[in-house]
Image (cartoon, rainbow, N blue to C red):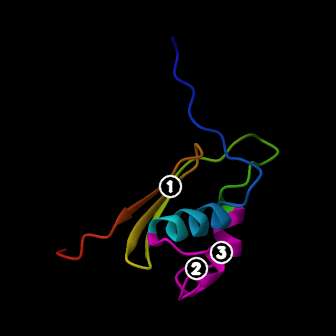
Amino acid sequence: MIATPPQRSSEAVSLEIVTKVAERNGVEPEELTPPLHSAIDTEALNNLFEPTKNGPREGAVTFEYNGYTVKVVANGSVDVEIADLSQ
């Protein structure tokens, strides 16, 4: 059996991040402070992972937001983990 990587849904990656962080905090997405755009340029992030006419993109972006380390991979995965503040 061949594993298929997750595919990016039609939802913008920034909305997926906000949803996951809000769920982990037990709040509604609109209640998150600071907003995601204060940590990263959300328009650029969304555009970075949009498919191109030549096919899907490659790469990953990792950044800190609201006490979490967020990693977005071009294969569609979005990981939100508690930030390791000891580094």
Q: Position of residue 7 (x, y in %)?
A: 65, 40
Residue furthest left in the image? 86
Asked if residue 7 is positioned above or below residue 14 in the image, the reply reads above
Asked if residue 31 is positioned above or below residue 52 in the image, the reply reads below
Q: Nearer the viewer, residue 41 or 57?
A: 41
30 is within the stretch colored magenta:
yes
Q: Which residue is mark 2?
A: 36
Mark 3 secondary-structure assignment: helix
Residue furthest top in the image? 1
Q: Which residue is mark 1?
A: 60
**Mark 3 neighbour class, 10 Å CA radius: few under 14, some 14 to 19, many 20 or more:** some
What residue do we see at 51% from left, 11% from top?
Answer: 1
- The amino acid type found where label 2 is placed reads Leu
Residue 87's image quarter? bottom left
Q: Position of residue 31 (x, y in %)?
A: 60, 83
Asked if residue 11 is positioned above or below residue 42 in the image, the reply reads above
What residue do we see at 23% from left, 76% from top?
Answer: 85
Whether residues under marks 2 and 3 lie with C-beta atoms below 8 angstroms apart, the answer is yes
- Residue 42's tag is 3
